[in-house]
Amino acid sequence: MLSSLKLLQPSTVAEASQALAEHGENARIYAGGAELLLLVRHGLVAAEVLIDIKKIDRLHRIQLQDGTLRVGACVTHHALENDPLVREHAPALASAESQLANVRVRSQGTLGGNLAFNDPHSDPGTALLVHNPAVILGGAGGERRVPLSEFFIDMYATALRPGELLVEVEIPRLPVGMNSAYRRLHRYQRPTLGVAAAARAAGGAIEEARLAVGCVGPKAQRLTDLEGKIKGAKLSDARRIVKEERKRLGNLLQPVDDLMGSAEYKLYMTGVMICEALEAANGAAA
Amino acid sequence: MEAANKNSTDKVGRFSDAPRRIDLKAKVTGRAQFIEDLPDLPGTIYAAALLSPYSHARILSIDASEALAMPGVLGVVDREHLDGVNPRLKLGAHDHFKLPDDQDFVAIKKVRYDGDLVAVIAAEDLATAERALQKIHVEYEPLAPVFDAVEALAPGAPILHEERGTNLLLEDSLIWGDVEEGFRAADRVFEETYSSPSMFHHPMEPIGGCLMHYLNGEVNVWLPTASPMRDAGEFAHFLGLEAGKVRLRVPYVGGGFGSKIPTTAHYAVLLLTRRLQRPVRLVPSEEYSFRQNSRHAEVFKAKMGVKADGTITALDVELVVDTGAYTTGGATGLHNSVISAWGCYRIPNLRVRGRCAYTNKVPAGHTRATGKVQTTWGIECTIDSVARQVGMDPYAFRKKNVLLRGDYVCKGTPAMDTDYLDLMSEAIAGIGWDGKSDLAPEKKAASSSPWVRGRGMALSLRHGSMGGGRAYALVTMDARGVLTIQHNAAEIGQGTHNLFSVIASETLEIPQSQVRVGTPDTAVSLPFAGVSAQRTTMQMGNAVHNACKQLKQELFTLASQAKGGKPEEWRIIAGKLCWGEAAFSIADIVRCYGGSVVLKAVGYHSAPPMVKDSAFAGMDHWAPSGAALDLEVNRDTGELRILGYAIIADAGKAIHYPSAKAQTDGGAVMGFGHALFEETVYQDGQFQNGDPFQYRLPLMKDVPEDFYSSMLEKGDGPGPFGSKGMAQTSIVTVGPAIGNAVYDALGVRVRSLPITPEKILRAMGKI
Ligand SMILES: Cc1cc2nc3c(=O)[nH]c(=O)nc-3n(C[C@H](O)[C@H](O)[C@H](O)COP(=O)(O)OP(=O)(O)OC[C@H]3O[C@@H](n4cnc5c(N)ncnc54)[C@H](O)[C@@H]3O)c2cc1C
């Protein structure tokens, strides 16, 4: 049961961060509320003041500027999955958004809420990582820009400082000839495993590949070592290389046994799905 | 009171052009009242339950004083506040076992599962009651829990009920012939083990809601339950009242599948309403519901002897059944498993031995086809596996060994009364299969696509409606010619009230719009064991049929006295009483008595009597089904795609076709849940997935698009119009049909439910 809460509705980022600074620990940013209201109801978050940021126009934008796609924090999953700019510019993200949970959660939840909450069992962060994006964080002292790979610190922990909110995600254009794809494994609403790949191939060999894995492990992360190992390899050899690297992947990701499956299963499937995502990214590029 | 929708049903004599269900409109428009829709009575207060967070712990102290001091809090029931009642619940007598009364309705010394009731608070409103729960201070001393029945029976396991000295609750067996002899006569002997996890029924309406009011030495109870007469009796006994002093009414019930029985907190609510003399309401949450009931986990271990030509010579089965923390449905779970473990085959030498054990899990009551989802999974995979190992096609092996119509089955049962060959041929045709399996599936591994096709089948047999004593129905024909049926069979989703309406309309040959069906109310003392065990159509259906036949006879007698002729010369045709050329409305005849006379008749059904030394007490008929399944499985990921499923149940006669078919469909969909997803998981001392977010149910997308369900209707059952109980036949075949199809595709066997991609990968040795 919800206890009574105070709702603030600022109309600018500055007002929002000011309200955050003012109420400190008692206040929470309230975007879609898909996550937050559950937390409050179960007594896991003791907020007294909710700062509803949905009245801030700027947070609802999806804009292509000089080759960079800018997505406001309050854009919903549903809007992202259907946006032609996103589909063209960041196919992995559009794909991840379309597979996220169910249409009710997608219509309510926002990209900013998802990234800021940083639940390990999430989709968009993994898909975004292969696009080398950055997030814009706004606070009392203005705005700063942090690469997404540095924004995710640990499960439920991000680079957000007290008084700061996530304003926007900047997604640069992929290099020419490169495409991205996302693969998701799930048994429940939330994903068991998410894998993203962006790749460019020429003459059957991988010229450049970016790989990211989420859910298995505490946070979504890039697999830079593996990316290096498959660079220059034939697509048909990638499977073998990924298999050889499984042990190293295990050390990096540290999967655990839980309701979704055993650590061994998750690691095995990570290998399978890296290859699937790579093939899909290449297939799309071809 | 439900009445038929006029224009859709105002015809008689049409079983198959299926009028709309009489409760359809109310349910679709939201007008139908379930327990939470019933308005508060004046002065209603709210109860909230405190459940144990530990699976096994001693209670060192409970202190509710801070909670009781809160404004708005009216009272508590815990071990310190029992109003002098004996907290030990009395179990009903069982046909086959002497059962121990092992459960207190509220924890006294120990808690034995995550969810055991510790206290119930009553307050002016729900929010206050829930806040007060947090102010009850309980000191626990955690004890080691045991979550597996086999481990619970091993030496050194933590003991749940110290006074018993063991976790073994009951033992049971079924023996005929001589298995040792049978194994000697066999050319080959095979051993197979299959296990099923505990799971939760997950009715849409959570378990445990109620509204109770104690007034002037009597209690009015509104409760979603399957067995109002039994529950009213138990509540009266608990309070030391005469049976008639508890009046229980049943609103529409939002699904049960065996789970809608009294919960421990209901007894606390009885005490609170008596103490406070105000109506008390309990509104359960999903998390609470998950902790009220479950299905028995089970291990099925079989040894089967066969001759080289595929004739079965012997079957020896050992079962371990997990009843959770208390007896609850342990006796039925064990007994049903034992008497169904042999499947539907001619087995000259049989021995089934079962043990039922306590574990620190949510107690297992009854679940749609209690005990038989587990044994059908075991025996039908065993049959497939043994057939393949002797080099026979599983379909041919089944045809060779299955019981045929008229075959003797066992002492105390009817002879086999169905046609398995028809069930099998229709099932395989339903998925467009000739029934032939791939006897060397390993070879398919050579193909380049990761997706491999496989097909499998499964048969099932369970006893039809069994025991439960007599069922009574009361029918009243008023001076308008309107018939009212009173009974104590709850409408729990399956269409019972509609069924009675159709039976009455068919029997009396009056339009359904002239039939009213009452809702269960124990004030009209009409015994019935409850809507469970495939009893309703058979037992209550027959009682309604019988009552209507008596009434019809009386109408004929009355008509002949009033208008002439002999009773046997009268007929009812299209709702009119006819004698030769003369036709009268029923109202005309009823009014012959003058004044406001009504005609009444009490009808009943008696289950066949118990047969001495038979494990099959008072059985009316057999209830079989046959299923076939077509799938693709991905060799790299273990993922399954169900391409088609066909299920054929023997209904004898579908009295209301859409409802009977919905039972077949619904059972199969629930079966897909059991086969592929559902499992209650216990780890690190706790129930891990006792909420709808973490408990995976089947979704619409998990049901194959090519889904064929049908019924055999030979009019050969002992129910009204030749019907049989059939609602539990379709749930059991899904698991083994999938398991067998996976084998057909890959040549590997998954031996525990649910069949997950991970288990398939493990069986293939990929992880
Ligand atoms: C049933 C269900 C299924 C789900 N399945 C999935 C799934 O499959 N994949 C997946 O990725 N996610 C899933 N989620 C999670 C959910 O969809 C996302 O996390 C959602 O996008 C959260 O967004 P929101 O706007 O509702 O956040 P809110 O609930 O409003 O906020 C979440 C948290 O982030 C903070 N916050 C919100 N916005 C900002 C901001 N701009 N700056 C700083 N802090 C902020 C809030 O203070 C709060 O702590 C699921 C959730 C539910 C309830």
Image (cartoon, coloured by chain):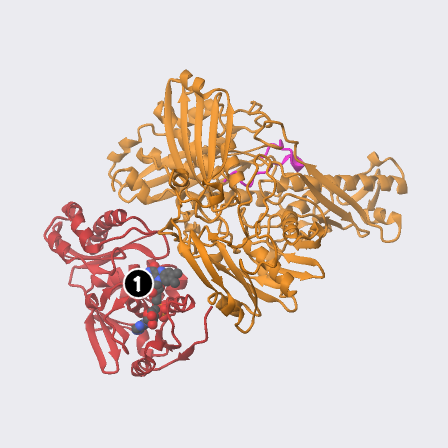
| Magenta residues, start to end | B713-730
Can residue B733 be seen?
Answer: no
- Which quadrant is the N terminus of chain B positioned in? bottom right
Mark 1 crowdedness (10 Å alpha carbons): few <14, some 14-19, many ≥20 = some
Residue type, mark 1 in image: Asp
Q: Does residue A93 sit above or below B147 in this rendering?
A: below
The chain letter for the residue carrying disc 1 is A
State the image coordinates of residue B99 (x, y, percent, origin top left). 56, 40
Q: Does residue B464 sit above or below B45 in this rendering?
A: above
Q: Residue furthest top?
A: B185
- In red, which chain? A
Report if the beta carbon of the residue with label 1 is closer than 8 angstroms to ligand 1: yes
Q: Does residue A171 sit above or below B661 in this rendering?
A: below
Instruction: Write down the residue under mark 1.
Output: A119
Predominant SS of the magenta segment: loop
- Which quadrant is the C terminus of chain B positioned in? top left
Can residue B72 be seen?
Answer: yes
Residue B265 is left or right of residue B539, and the answer is left
- In orange, which chain? B
